[in-house]
Amino acid sequence: MPSPSLEIRPRPSADSPVRSFLDEFWATTQENWLNPRQRIVAGVAGVEVCPSVYDRAGTVHITDIVASRPGEGQGTTALQQILVLADKHGVSLDLIARSYVKERLTSRQLRDWYSRHGFQTKNGNARDGYCMVRCST
């Protein structure tokens, strides 16, 4: 008999905007067989999202966006799809803009990239990352 999985993230109620966002996100994306926590968005980038535990109800946390071919606009394409979905369901988005790979964007470059897409920096620094939020439009 398989052991039950440990759920450490909050489960939004069935009628919440966050739950509606997550349901549509999972229905319109594909499984990433390399990382089961991620979904493939727009056929080009691995994205992980979950209900936010950092801020408030009605917010989805973007944990990760990973383009398979950096520098070709895949991350932007995936983020734009997430922004459309967030606005459709009236949810805010939060994240920590932090670089984990030296060959990719720095934390400051990530902060600037997210800022161009409507995110505002709440606090942070280049070493630990920048806490950012985008309210629903």
Image: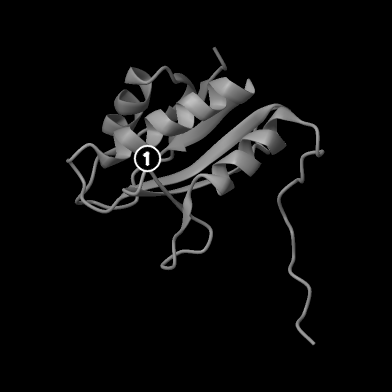
| 125 sits to left or right of 56 | left
Q: Is residue 5 left or right of residue 113?
A: right
Tell me which residue sits at (52%, 23%) in the image: 133
Identify the image quadrant of residue 125: top left
Asked which secondary structure carries label 1, the reply is loop
Residue at figure coordinates x 48%, y 48% from the top left = 29
Estimate the x, y position of residue 50 in percent, counting from the top left: 61, 44
Residue 84: percent from left, percent from top? 47, 25
The residue located at (39%, 40%) in the rendering is 98
The answer to whether 137 is drawn above or below residue 51 in the figure is: above
Badge 1 density bin: few <14, some 14–19, many ≥20, Cα 10 Å: few
Of 54 and 27, which appears nearest the observer? 27
Q: Is residue 46 visible?
A: yes
Q: Amino acid at mark 1?
A: Arg
Q: Nearer the viewer, residue 20 or 10?
A: 20
Which residue is the extreme one toward the front? 28
Please identify the quarter of the rendering in which residue 52 is found.
Answer: top right
Residue 127 quadrant: top left
93 sits left or right of 117 in the view: right
In this view, the residue farthest toward the top is: 137
Q: Quadrant of the C terminus?
A: top right
Q: Name the residue nearer the viewer: 87 or 28.
A: 28
Give 104 or 126, whichever is nearer the viewer.
104
Q: Check the image and report above or below for 51 versus 94.
A: below
The number of numbered discs placed on residues in the rendered structure image is 1
Q: Quadrant of the N terminus?
A: bottom right
* Residue at the spot 46% in from the left edge and 55% down from the top edge: 30
Q: Which residue is mark 1?
A: 127
**Which residue extends farthest bottom?**
1
